[in-house]
Image (cartoon, rainbow, N blue to C red):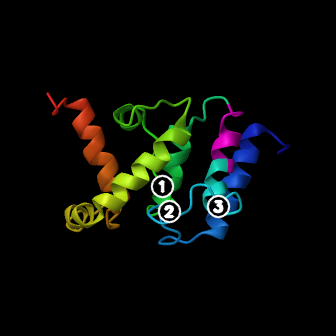
């Protein structure tokens, strides 16, 4: 199985999973600027995915969010557009998303509390924010 960009992503993703838990760390409190902190584990996976054709940040974050729903936000172009950023600058999305998650956490938690995922896991407040913003963008509810 030699070294390929895909095996590098797989190893980095496994390292993230090995060094984090299902509920901790939390995206709400993780230091996005700490060069030696948990967030750098995700940034490393995303940097490596840039080298793997067809393995965009949206795919990587969707896979990792299922394993770490409190830690890994899903990168989605619609959500990024809401926060005035793009796939070329995902680092601009994370602080804005974190700020909204913190500002509206109680309401998001309340809304998510009655929802279960298809595999019967509780919906994370982080995912609730993602869904609400995505729906807002695609349904043009602002207009």
Q: Do the residues labelled 3 and 2 touch (CB within 8 Å)?
A: yes
Q: Do the residues labelled 2 and 1 touch (CB within 8 Å)?
A: yes
Q: Answer with mark 3 or mark 2, whichever residue precedes in sequence.
A: 3
Segment colored magenta: 44-52
C-alpha span from label 1 to label 3: 11 Å
Say which of 136 and 100 sits in front: 100
Residue drawn at 36 percent across, 61 percent down: 102
C-alpha span from label 2 to label 1: 5 Å
Asked if residue 70 lies left or right of residue 109, the reply is right
55 to 17, vertically: above or below: above
The residue indicated by pointer 3 is 16
Residue drawn at 39 percent across, 54 percent down: 99
Image coordinates of residue 95 in percent, x first then y, are 47, 49
Q: In terms of secondary structure, where does tag 3 sit?
A: helix
Q: Answer with mark 1 or mark 3, whichever residue precedes in sequence.
A: 3
Residue drawn at 55 percent across, 41 percent down: 91
Image coordinates of residue 7 in percent, x first then y, are 75, 46
Residue 36 located within the stretch drawn in magenta:
no
Disc number for residue 65: 1
Q: In terms of secondary structure, where does tag 2 sit?
A: loop
Asked if residue 86 lies left or right of residue 1, the reply is left
């Amino acid at each position: 199985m030699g070294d390929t960009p895909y095996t590098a992503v797989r190893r980095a993703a496994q390292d993230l999973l090995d060094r984090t838990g299902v509920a901790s760390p939390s995206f709400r409190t993780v230091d996005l600027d700490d060069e030696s902190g948990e967030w750098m584990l995700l940034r490393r996976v995303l940097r490596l995915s840039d080298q793997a054709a067809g393995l965009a940040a949206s795919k990587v974050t969707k896979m990792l969010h299922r394993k770490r729903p409190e830690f890994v936000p899903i990168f989605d172009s619609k959500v990024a557009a809401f926060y005035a950023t793009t796939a070329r600058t995902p680092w601009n999305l994370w602080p804005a998303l974190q700020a909204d998650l913190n500002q509206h956490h109680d309401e998001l938690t309340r809304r998510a509390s009655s929802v279960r995922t298809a595999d019967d896991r509780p919906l994370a407040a982080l995912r609730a924010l993602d869904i609400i913003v995505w729906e807002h963008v695609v349904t043009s509810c602002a207009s």
